[in-house]
Image (cartoon, rainbow, N blue to C red):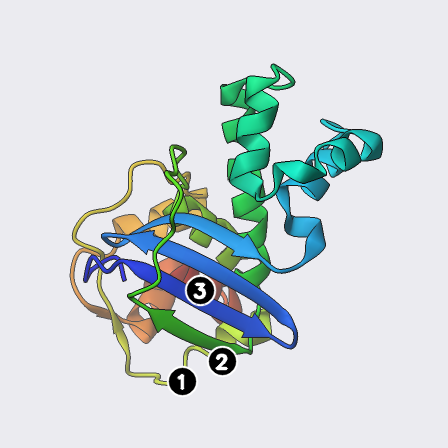
Amino acid sequence: LLNKKLSGRLQLQRDKIKVAIYFQSGQLVFAACNLQDFRLGAYLVKCAVLSEADLLQLAKAGKDFELAKTLISAKRISSERAEQLQVRLVEDILCLALLWDDGTWDFDHRSQINEEVTFRIDAPALLLETARRLPAEVIGSRFRNPNEHFSPVAVQPNSINLSPTEGFLLSRIDAPVSFRDLSVMSGLAESELQRVLYSL
């Protein structure tokens, strides 16, 4: 989606849980989930920004974006704090979906987000952090071809904080290289090398 600069909605589903991820020109801009705990109101209660009583009074605010605008207008929360919480909520939703190892997906380029999103999601950093948390057996299943070669990306994101091991390995890849050669070069155990490569 990023390389092709596509816009639209990527819907992921696992059992009855649905996550909708919206892209604009290849950039991830927003995500929503059908679980009540991932609605903004419930999230604000969880973060102790609102009480249950407050949320009941604000029920008429409607959708999440409208709730945020209502709270800002009533000076219950600053616009900066509202953006911080919305970013955290979107990141939590994305972490939920990125840790799934099964499910279905569908991309609809005709479905666009109707609201103006003013905050930014650091997708590369989120992808890296999630990959670090995946079970070893899930990562291992992605390395089916022992002759596969790995190449560095043309432009590396500036915002990512690599671990020393990740940084060392990345600095050693300046041309296509096989898993076997990387294993010899790094001295890492197979499972650790797989995790680092998958994360990168």
Circle number at residue 193: 3
Please state if 94 lies on the left or on the right of 21 as rendered.
right
Q: Is residue 85 visible?
A: no
Disc 2 marks a residue whose amino acid type is Ser
Query: Quarter of the image containing the N terminus?
Result: bottom left
Q: Between 45 and 174, which is closer to the camera in this rendering?
A: 45
Residue underneath mark 1: 144
Residue at screen point 57% across, 67% down: 18
Assign a secondary structure to mark 2: loop
Structural distance between the alpha carbons of marks 3 and 1: 14 Å
Residues packed near mark 2 inside 10 Å, few (<14), some (14 to 19) or many (20 plus): few
Where the C terminus falls, by quadrant? bottom left
Q: Tell me residue 101's x, y (percent).
A: 56, 74
Residue at 25%, 57% in the rendered image: 2
Name of the residue lying farthest toward the top: 75
In the image, what residue type sits under mark 3?
A: Leu
Residue 99: quarter of image: bottom right
Of callouts 3 and 2, the N-terminal one: 2
**Element carrying mark 1:** loop
User: The disc labelled 1 sits on which kind of residue?
Assistant: Arg
At 39% across and 55% down in the image, what residue appears?
22
Q: Position of residue 139 (x, y in %)?
A: 50, 71
Q: Which residue is mark 2?
A: 141
Which of labels 3 and 1 is toward the front? 1
Disc 3 element: helix
